[in-house]
Image (cartoon, helix red, strand yellow):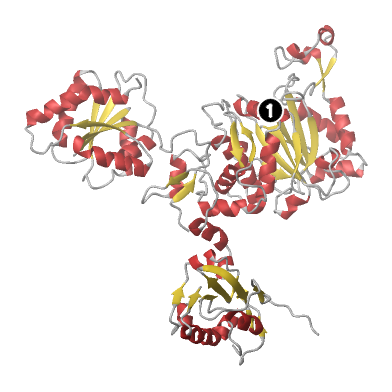
Amino acid sequence: MRAMTQVAVPHIETSGKPAFPGGTFLAIVKRDCPTCVLVMPVLREIERHIEHLGGTLQVHVQDDVTLAAGFSHAYDDIVLATSYRYNIDTVPTLIRLKDGREDARVVGWLRSEWQSLTGIAALGEGLPAYRPGCGSKTLDPGMPARLKVKYGNSGLASRRIEVPPLSDPVETCYERGWSDGLPVVPPTEERVLEMLDGTARSPNEVIGLIPPNLVPCTVEKVAINAVMAGCRPEHMPVVLTAIEAALMPAFGLHGVLATTNACTPVIMVNGPIARAIGMNAKGNVFGQGNRANAAIGRTLQLVVRNVGGGRPGEIDRSVFGSPAKYSFCFAEDEDDPRWESYAVSLGYSPRASTVTIFPGDGITQTIDHISRKPEDLCRSYAGCIRAIYHTGHIIGVQAFLAIAQEHATVFYDAGWSKARVKEELLELLKIPVREVVPGRSGLSGLTVEEKADADNLIPKFKNGTFNIIRAGGSAGKYSAIISSIGGRGSIEPVTKEIK
Amino acid sequence: MHDIRGLEQLGIVAVGVATTEFKVAAAAQSQALGYDPAVVFVRHPIQDRTREEIRALADSALEQILANLTAL
Amino acid sequence: MPENILLDPTAETAAAIVPRLARPQSIAGKTIGLFDIAKMRGDEFLDRLDELLTARGYVVKRYRKKHFTHLAPIELKQRIKSECDLVIEGLAD
């Protein structure tokens, strides 16, 4: 016997008791369903039979009430209030009420079950024995969230803000100070509910305390800001993990927010989720144009602004800032297996998806069209990296070096691992004491022994971290440096797995 | 009310002057707009006053108006 | 979808109402705009304020919108903003 593929299998949910005469029945149907159209004559039979016994059949139509023309109790359920109330997922559904409450129901058309439910022998004899039902309109795209807001208890705890009559919701968001300067998507209840569908976590779960005001931030608040930022629900797992990572003490988020430096949290994603949600790791990787990159990064910034209270001119004392403070989020390029990804080098499985947060103040490029040997390319890099903040600045400076494909090929062809490149660079990035700047960016951080000899060599990254990643487009002999203040024990890169 | 909001949105400190007749409406508009502007109220009515009476109203309102323009 | 109800994205420590602009510590010698919303007799009230403020050393500039039922045009508001430090609007009755 050929297996049947069907939209919905008719079934009966019943207490098992025999049907009683009379009573109230509810039928929920829609014209755009061949099975519903098929059973209309059956419903007429039921109505005749039941009315004769003093009962009632209500017919509720989800799309075109004329389908129920001629019935004694026909209802237009285009607003889907009844369908929502009775939790209809398939049409036709026939419900038997006892004392006003649901006693049993049948879904789809199965003659034997309809006969049993109604107690009408020989009901629907002229019809095929069964036909599957169709999806209820309550399950149309976007409808579950909309109906939940309209009829249900959305379960959202945040204060409701009314947009003044005749006002533009986008302007209201600006007026209330919620925007980073660019328009935000107005966070309606429906949009927030749909965003929350992107995570299994409960809306009232607190994910952490957001600086500078150390405010408890719920999943719901994250979802509201994610809506404003332009996220899709499938971005939520990355967003939540990014915020949790940024709150890890080692990252020192408060310091990043309150500094006079231009730096800001940078979000880097590793693992399968990057491709799954369409992130960019290639051409223009740190720039505009990719929704996931843009919106995930922006959400973190908006959460800091709106939940944490971190704003320029207040706690944020940054002298320059940078466009990175709108959003700086990307995926590492993991396509070439010759170098392991950042996450794998930390010990994560290649099948794991992770979010890394590190501080960054924008990008500086290194151009080298000539070098074909890895040592030469490293010397080019070293000249640029040495100059971060000042050629003699060695305390509280750190960097990520993003190597694009053409430069990476130089290392691949020579068989150099990422670790080898890093080792070479750190060796080149040693600065004689005589060139180290005075003060807390240099000499103040050295020991008496170190300072004793002007020829002593001090690492550029004396207490700062230095990491190499792969990112960027395939054409162009460039690499990019993302520098920052901070270092071990103050502001460090942190990584968290997305669960 | 809308004008005062519009002016403050442009970044200029604003205060409105209205008669006491306007108090209830002003409160309702505040609520609806989600914005509470500075308003000084003078005695109603205005339309049937003499010129001297209107000048006297301005005299009596001046200090309150200035107070609403400064941080105190 | 209706967009008239929004969820508050903030920590909700501030009132739901948008606050007024912060007032300056001192307004000595500032330029004050008197903005006539064009209701009858309002000009007489503002005329007297003009005299009083000028006598106190403020620079006074006068503005008027065409009709009290209309919102002030953006150009007028921008002009007030660019020419004045503060503005007094009246007289609503």
Residue that sits furthest to the right in the current view: A415
Residue C13 percent location from the top left of the image = 49, 33
Q: Secondary structure at mark 1?
A: loop
Q: Amino acid at mark 1?
A: Gly
Q: Residue at x 82, y 10 (%)?
A: A454
Q: Residue at x 26, y 42 (%)?
A: B25
- The image quarter in which residue B57 lies: top left
Give the letter of the chain under mark 1: A
Does A292 sit left or right of A448 as displayed?
Answer: left
Does C64 sit left or right of A376 as displayed?
Answer: left
Residue, disc 1: A252
**Label 1: few (<14), some or many (≥20) within 10 Å?**
many
Q: Residue at x 23, y 47 (%)?
A: C69
Residue that sits furthest to the bottom in the current view: A126
From this view, report whether residue A454 is shown above or below residue A263. above
Residue A426 percent location from the top left of the image = 85, 27
Residue A465 percent location from the top left of the image = 78, 28
Q: Residue B1: in sight, yes or no?
A: no
From this view, report whether residue B68 is shown above or below residue A341. above
Closer to the camera in the image, C65 or A21: A21
Closer to the camera in the image, A264 or A420: A264
